[in-house]
Image (spheres, grey):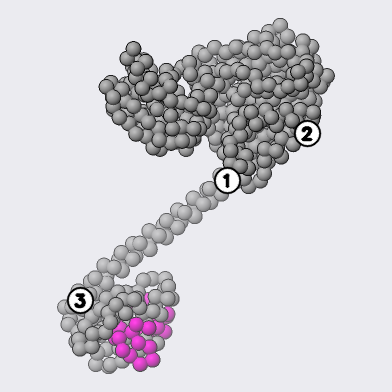
Amino acid sequence: MKLSTHVQGEFTIAVIGETRMDAAVAPELKHQISQLLNDGATRIVLDLSAVTFMDSSSLGALVSLLKMVGNRGDLIIAGSKGIVADLFKLTRMDRVFRMADSVDAALGAVAA
Amino acid sequence: MKILVVDDARDMQLILRRILTLMGHQVVLANHGQEAWELLQQHNFQVVISDWVMPIMDGPTLCRTIRAAELPHYVYIILLTGMSSKQNLILGMEAGADDFATKPIVREELEVRLRAAQRVLNLEQTLEDKNRNLEGVNQSLSATQALIQSDLKRAASLQTGVLPVHKAFGRLCVDWFFQPAQYIGGDTFNYFPINDDLFFFYSIDVSGHGISAALLSMCLQTLLSSTGELYCQDELTRENAATFPARLAENLNHHLNHVLDTGDHYLTLIMGVVDTAEERLHFVQAGHPQPFLYDPSTQQIERIDCTGFPIGLMPDMEYETISLPFPTGSRFVLYSDGILELHHASGEPMTEDDLQTCLQALIGLPARELVSRLGEQLGLGKENEDKPDDISLLIIDSCG
């Protein structure tokens, strides 16, 4: 799975480089982000703006990552759109995750 | 080592035999390539030391003959070359020779060449052993794989076997389509009458595919069956029908988060009850694709805008029951998101709107015919086509 990360202030921005997040990607996604958490990142912004399809196993992976973060930090979903945003709404996960229109909006919203 | 010496010169044969015998090797002599080849087919020689120019069959031809024969063991070939006539060594290599030795023979040089030969032959032997071992492992893996495949095929037919068979229940007519993605899948559904007035139904999609998803879906079939633990806690009656689906979803969510270890799996569902006496539909939405409802008064099929938390994803979620009128002529359509992973012939992905258009166009057909026509239009049921996800579709008609 293509994932690029960079640090901006206290945030770790993780940009998903895949257009499809399906069962083939989910385990790797979980592994790589949990690695970031193990390495000490607590505030993660996950940029999904390149993603055009997400299935239930990837959503499941995101939720288990959110549980891993717990109260110790943030896992903010940024840039979801189209059927990816629809999936978050349909499953009400847009009420469980902190959602932002873009990475900039995510950083701004938290700073404000 | 067992060495075959091939030379048309008697003195050369004798010199080589003496040197090699003194080194402790077993030596057999041949006068030319043809004679050597006949001996090679009858006996196991590890090394051939052959002259280049010989009558009947020369050295390079012998090399090619040995290599082409693919003997059960590797034969290490040393070609002899004269000091004066520098033959084309590349030609010898290409014919299949491993090494060269110059005439006149120097004992020490030959010993070095034979030690190199021994080393290569040992490596060849190790490689052969490993290959044989791998082949054995591969065979047993293939056998296991075949067993699993046939098991999965049987499991798929058994899984289809738990799906409901009856399709007419008083005023209600029901039909469905089911197709697992890879032998067995995580989609399932069921429906059954509770009494003359109440009809219970659900459509479930377990996240992920394969064996564990399928087993979880079977597990849910048991949990939600009328004798199941969850269901019995709280009997469904006409009085509680409007709150029952949400409470059952909460129970199920609790069960999956606290009792059953589902690993990474969770599920989306729509589960509900039709009250035919009241002509009402009560259902709970847990992250499943939004269902369609046909209203006979407007003659329009509409997508019901509803959302809900999936089951087994997070503990202690609240669910609500959606209650809608369901008069004679109504149609309720439930489906799993596998349909939305299909593509049109043009390559465009299927959308909810496309499905709505299809359903609207076929609204005059009874459920049974609708299922087969929709199947044709969406390209379902085609054999040998790789479906990305399980596909299930459930239609409930109030026929009056």
Query: Which label sits in the foreground, 1 or 2?
Result: 2
Q: Tell me the number on the disc at residue B149.
A: 1
| Numbered disc 2: secondary structure | helix
Q: Chain of mark 3?
A: B
Front residue of B323/B82: it is B323
Query: Which label sits in the foreground, 3 or 1?
Result: 1
Residue receiving disc 2: B369
Query: Which label sits in the foreground, 2 or 3?
Result: 2
User: Furthest residue to the top?
Assistant: B239
- Cα–Cα span, label 2 and label 3: 86 Å
Question: Which residue is located at x 72 percent, y 28 percent?
Answer: B360
Q: Chain of mark 2?
A: B
The reply to whether residue B52 is in sight is: yes
Spot occupied by residue B128 in the image (x, y as percentages of width and height): 38, 63
The reply to whether callout 1 and callout 2 are in contact (CB within 8 Å) is: no
- Cα–Cα span, label 1 and label 2: 33 Å
- Cα–Cα span, label 3 and label 1: 56 Å
Highlighted magenta segment, given as a residue range: B35-61
